[in-house]
Amino acid sequence: RRDYGKGSIRRRETKRGARYDAQIYLGVDPISGKPRFQSKSHTSEKAAERWLREQRSSGMAGTPSTSATVGRLLAEWLEVQRHRVEVSGTISQSTLSWYSGAIRRHLDPKLGHLEAAKVTASEIAAFLTDRQQSGGPGGRPLGKSSIRQLTIILRAVFAHAVAEGWIDRSPMDRVELPRVDATKSRERVWPIAEVRRFLDHTADTPLGPLWRVLALTGLRRGEALGLTWADVSLPDIGQPALEVRRTYVVVDGRAEFSKPKTERSRRRVPIDEGTAAILGELRADQRLAFGADWRPDFSVFARPDLAPWNPNVVTRTFQRTAGELGLDPIGPHGLRHSVATELGEQGVPLTVVSRLLGHSSVRVTGDVY
């Protein structure tokens, strides 16, 4: 794997004598995902070495010039995040995919052309307000959580640029974030009565057990879809609970198993007797269908062919059913928010809610809710 800013020199023979081809790696383009290079041929090795040094000092790599664009900062930062996935494993592939998608859909089209050293806090604030009010591609306004995530990326990108000496200071230090409409924020959750109505209506559908688990445990969609029967403790083998060990998520348009979002996402989540009974029936039906071929590593929430439900299909089914019932289209993740909101209103300590949801810290839980 090449490191950003790393250069190389290759000698080749021509009819006019030796040539020295210098090449420097500029990271991966955040839009196309393809590696980028700058190269030039020289008549001597010393000239090639001098050219590489000049590119590094003038902004072709490593320490960009003051005219570098925000798009260039985004590309460099995204390359660092790819390194974290490939080498250190400190973030998941699904998180990287989300970063890449956010840059491609929202950040680069609107901010990429701006000169990094001159971008202002007001320009950043105007961008965030625009995303909140008119949304991105498709025109759907972004919610509180999405605005927060874009803000996190921008803070990280500009902080990295300051640390690398690309810019003197981060415009994010002076950004006044847009106010979140409280009415729109409340639409992201359902009152407990609406959750019960949705669960009652879908109890006998193929995805009914999944909806109940999401609504009563606060698991993420991918965490629930990643469960196998080996991860499920029912009354016959101990205290009813679910062990979150992996996720089933969409990465770059393809569904695949992945590691949990953070170390704290690996957790044991207790379940109530009613949910345990429903899962027990689901397991019994699956055992009956497959007989001696049944194994504990079969997915809990699977189609008849045992393949896990595609996460995007799950979301579309949820939203379609919610629409039929006249409920706000909060999406499956909205059930997680509904659980957290209900627990908070009941006075459950934030530390307990954070542990249940598998957040990386209590601060994250407080920021979101």
Image (spheres, helix red, strand yellow):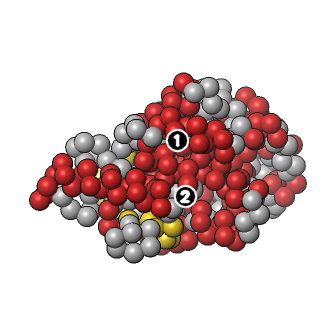
**Residue 334: x and y, percent?**
61, 44
Tell whether 195 sits left or right of 305: right
Q: Residues within 10 Å of mark 2 (few under 14, many from 20)?
A: many
**Which residue has dot 2 on it?**
217
Three-letter code, disc 1: Leu
Label total for image: 2
Q: Is residue 129 above or below residue 223?
A: above
Q: CA distance from mark 1 to mark 2?
A: 14 Å
Q: Nearer the viewer, residue 182 or 211?
A: 211
Which residue appears farthest toward the left when viewing the image? 292
Residue 258 visible in image = no
**Residue 40: x and y, percent?**
47, 52
Dot placed on the residue nearer the N-terminal end, 1 or 2: 1
Residue 324 visible in image = yes
Q: Nearer the viewer, residue 288 or 359?
A: 288
Could you say which quadrant of the image residue 204 lies in? Answer: top left
Residue shown at 74% from the left, 69% from the top? 349
**Residue 323: x and y, percent?**
57, 26
Three-letter code, disc 2: Thr
**Which residue has dot 1 on it?**
199
Residue shown at 64% from the left, 38% from the top? 194
Q: For numbered disc 2, what is the local secondary structure?
A: helix
Q: For numbered disc 1, what is the local secondary structure?
A: helix
Tell whether 29 sits left or right of 152: left
- In the picture, which quadrant includes the N terminus? bottom left
Q: Nearer the viewer, residue 344 or 246?
A: 344
- In the picture, which quadrant includes the C terminus? bottom right
Residue shown at 56% from the left, 50% from the top? 215
Residue shown at 70% from the left, 32% from the top? 141
Q: Which dot marks residue 155?
A: none
